[in-house]
């Protein structure tokens, strides 16, 4: 029987500069990547697992320093009884100039480092681990072409950093059914940041800490066990924070305070203080309300660890006077035309507001 933890796509060193984050949130996030990486290694030690798999993109080559890779080495060396198996991904490819090659690793760390699939054997555990490391930032080769198959009687595990969802991907396209039929007891995948259990024997671990609003919901690690009965894998939420996007529907009866309250009540207090929120406001705004999104964010900041607001609302209009004021221009014609449709119909009414919004902006601009 063997026990393992599967992680990957940690992206240590990521700067979070592309996001709208203020510097304190960005630097916290960088620290949190390191802390979560350490927590994963600590969990592997506490759970006395046999293997820790890291399936690519452990770090961001672009930003990583020799000091950083030594820090990785020191963290991993503490798990001296755990076989740590690392494949390189497209963000941390292993080649002659790679940081992976600049230092001496402790004996428990195994970094896959040949072209093609490499096999590392653990006879005392009756286990063979196969892996493929990237040596460049794009890869379309069929690396499994020359694969000769697994040895029956062993526990066989394959580690790959690639894409099973897009056969045209330049990030190592993989065929799920083909992989399934290779006879592995577990295939640990990296590259896709959303955790995804593909089958009882194959999973994307996902990034343990989500990296931006494109990576919403729970993130964590895969924990597994393989014995005579077969393979058992489970996703364990492990991230310090999650990214959440919420859409709030505003109607013309809402005042400023109503909107603020609605946003404050979008989740419970403890979660607001912990997670990162993107609030999208939609619907029709009372024409007397003047919303300054910056002010609104400032007044909400004490309730949120991080909040950003996207305003997609449209203004409510006094249609009759607006029509009168614009009888001879396109705004007036548009209102007249829309009034001939059913304005009680929600879709028609929204189309009217969106159209008016665009026309009024054109008028002002
Ligand atoms: Mn990645």
Image (spheres, helix red, strand yellow):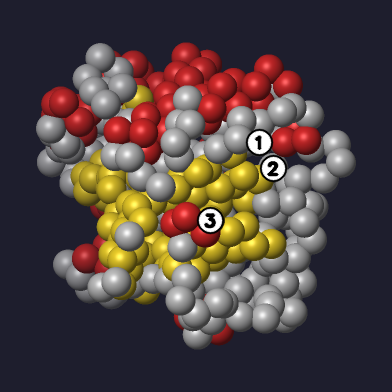
User: Which secondary structure lies at badge 2?
Assistant: loop
Q: Quadrant of residue 323?
A: bottom left
- Between 250 and 317, the one lying in front of the other is 250
* Vertical side of 209 occupied by 56: above or below: below
Using the rendered image of the protein, determine whether residue 120 is visible from the camera's viewpoint.
yes
Badge nearest the viewer, 2 or 3: 3
User: Which secondary structure lies at badge 1?
Assistant: loop
Q: What is the quadrant of the N terminus in the image?
A: bottom left
Q: Say few, some or many: other residues with alpha carbon within 10 Å of mark 2 (under 14 / 14 to 19 / 20 or more).
A: many
Task: Give the residue at mark 3.
Answer: 122
- Between 357 and 97, the one lying in front of the other is 97
Using the rendered image of the protein, determine whether residue 363 is visible from the camera's viewpoint.
no
Residue at position x 47%, y 55% in the image: 124
Q: Are marks 2 and 1 in contact (CB under 8 Å)?
A: yes
Task: Give the residue at mark 1.
Answer: 60
Q: Position of residue 64 (x, y in %)?
A: 69, 27
Task: Give the residue at mark 2.
Answer: 92
Q: Earlier in the sequence, mark 2 or mark 1?
A: 1
* Vertical side of 223 occupied by 262: above or below: above
């Amino acid at each position: 029987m063997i026990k393992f933890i599967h992680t990957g796509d940690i992206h240590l060193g990521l700067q979070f500069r592309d996001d709208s984050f203020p510097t304190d949130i960005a630097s916290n996030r960088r620290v949190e990547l390191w802390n979560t990486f350490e927590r994963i290694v600590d969990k592997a030690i506490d759970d006395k697992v046999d293997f820790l798999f890291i399936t690519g993109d452990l770090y961001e080559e672009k930003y990583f320093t020799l000091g950083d890779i030594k820090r990785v080495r020191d963290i991993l060396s503490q798990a001296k009884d755990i076989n740590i198996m690392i494949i390189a991904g497209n963000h941390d490819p292993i080649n002659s100039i790679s940081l992976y090659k600049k230092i001496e690793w402790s004996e428990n760390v195994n970094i896959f480092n040949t072209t093609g699939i490499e096999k590392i054997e653990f006879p005392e555990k009756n286990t063979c681990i196969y892996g493929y490391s990237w040596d460049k930032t794009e890869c379309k080769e069929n690396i499994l072409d020359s694969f000769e198959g697994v040895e029956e009687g062993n526990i066989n595990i394959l580690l790959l950093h690639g894409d099973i969802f897009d056969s045209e991907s330049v990030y190592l396209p993989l065929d799920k059914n083909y992989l399934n039929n290779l006879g592995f007891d577990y295939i640990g995948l990296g590259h896709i940041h959303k955790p995804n259990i593909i089958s009882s024997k194959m999973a994307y671990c996902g990034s343990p800490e989500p990296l931006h609003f494109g990576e919403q919901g729970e993130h964590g690690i895969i924990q597994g066990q393989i014995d005579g009965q077969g393979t058992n894998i489970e996703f364990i939420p492990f991230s310090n924070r999650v990214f959440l996007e919420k859409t709030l529907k505003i109607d013309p009866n809402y005042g400023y305070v109503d909107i603020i309250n609605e946003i404050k009540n979008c989740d419970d207090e403890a979660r607001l203080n912990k997670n990162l929120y993107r609030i999208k406001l939609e619907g029709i705004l009372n024409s007397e309300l003047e919303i300054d999104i910056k002010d609104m964010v400032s007044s909400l900041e004490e309730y949120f660890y991080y909040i950003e607001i996207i305003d997609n609302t449209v203004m409510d209009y006094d249609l009759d006077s607006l029509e009168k004021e614009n009888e001879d221009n396109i705004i007036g014609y548009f209102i007249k035309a829309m009034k001939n449709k059913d304005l009680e119909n929600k879709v028609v009414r929204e189309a009217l507001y969106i159209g008016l919004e665009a026309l009024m902006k054109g008028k002002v601009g």
